[in-house]
Amino acid sequence: GVQGHKRVSSGTLHLLKQDYKIDYAINTENSGNMVVQAFVGRSEGKIHIKAKELHFHIKDIFPQFKFQLTAFEIMNQILAAMGPEMQSPGPDTWMTFTKHSDLPNYPQIRMEIVEFHHLGYLVLEFQIRTVPGMTDETITQDLRRMLDKFEDKYPYLDTRVEWPSRTKTRPAASTSRDHPLVQSLAHWHERVTGEPGDVGSQGRSGAAADGSHTHEAGITTVLYGPGGGEKDKEYRLKAHLKEGQPDERIAIKDLITTTKVLALTAADICG
């Protein structure tokens, strides 16, 4: 199930094609042994931007083109309309979504690539870390509504939304904190470690997971695994500041904790 988990989820998607009857899933992503019952999705796509090619001096020589914008100028306006990257969107955002209490800073966007085809044709590729309720269809509709305003303003502009563009979308997922699977994991974590079994999204803040696909398939899914999470923040900061490499080791005691908690939860849930 872990094959290709970082990008394409090939193992999980193959697993879901098998004739298994699965009720619950625990995705052992590195959550710092926190029970993560709500996590963002990841959706990637493109906006194709086509305008008239304008070479140097054209605006100077021909007055009728003086106020015509290039594809790059229009792209800059579209970027401004999309809002800031990697921040919680403001009240005037183009995105339609319902705020999720466990994911208060999302959705967020991140620009990835600008493809240059020629002076009049650019492609803007970006991703969105989504919240529950956002789908490929809602994102496409929201983008189309925003881009239609630009096309109304600039008759020489043609835009197209390609969504999704690269990989199968990982939808955001949310399970009730009161669900038996969540409660069982938290209970046995406390019994094994003597520390409270914390429940919440902080263990995977902003990170997507293969659990999106099992959740989408109707399988109640939560994340719980060793390494990462709140415990890794110091090392991640050092790596970001170029002050050292991230510590990617997993403590043996956390592996043992995870193994025990998974076994006890399975016995508890399955009876």
Image (tube, grey):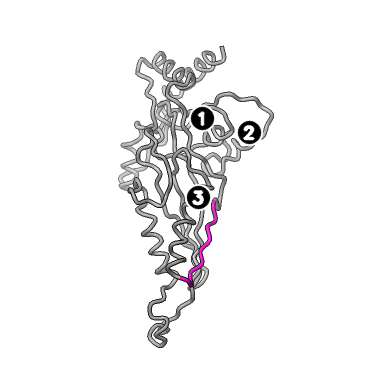
Which residue has dot 2 on it?
16
Closer to the N terminus: mark 3 or mark 2? 2
Considering every residue shown, the one lying at the far right of the view is 19
Q: Which mark is residue 162?
A: none
Q: Is residue 156 magenta?
A: yes
Find the residue positioned furthest to the front.
152
Q: Which residues are magenta?
A: 155-163
Q: Which amino acid lies under the numbered mark 3 shown in the image of this protein?
A: Glu
How far apart, in angstroms, are the residues tagged by discs 1 and 2? 14 Å
Query: Which residue is tagged 3?
Result: 44
Examine the structure image and report whether residue 221 is included in the region drawn in magenta.
no
Locate residue 223, reporting x and y percent. 47, 29
| Residue on which the image places disc 1 | 27
Q: Residues within 10 Å of mark 2 (few under 14, many from 20)?
A: some
x, y (%) of residue 98? 41, 40
Q: Residue furthest bottom?
A: 61
Mark nearest the camera among 1 and 3 is 3
The amino acid sitting under disc 2 is Leu
Bin the neighbour count of mark 1 within 10 Å (Cα to Cα): few under 14, some 14-19, many 20 and up. Answer: many
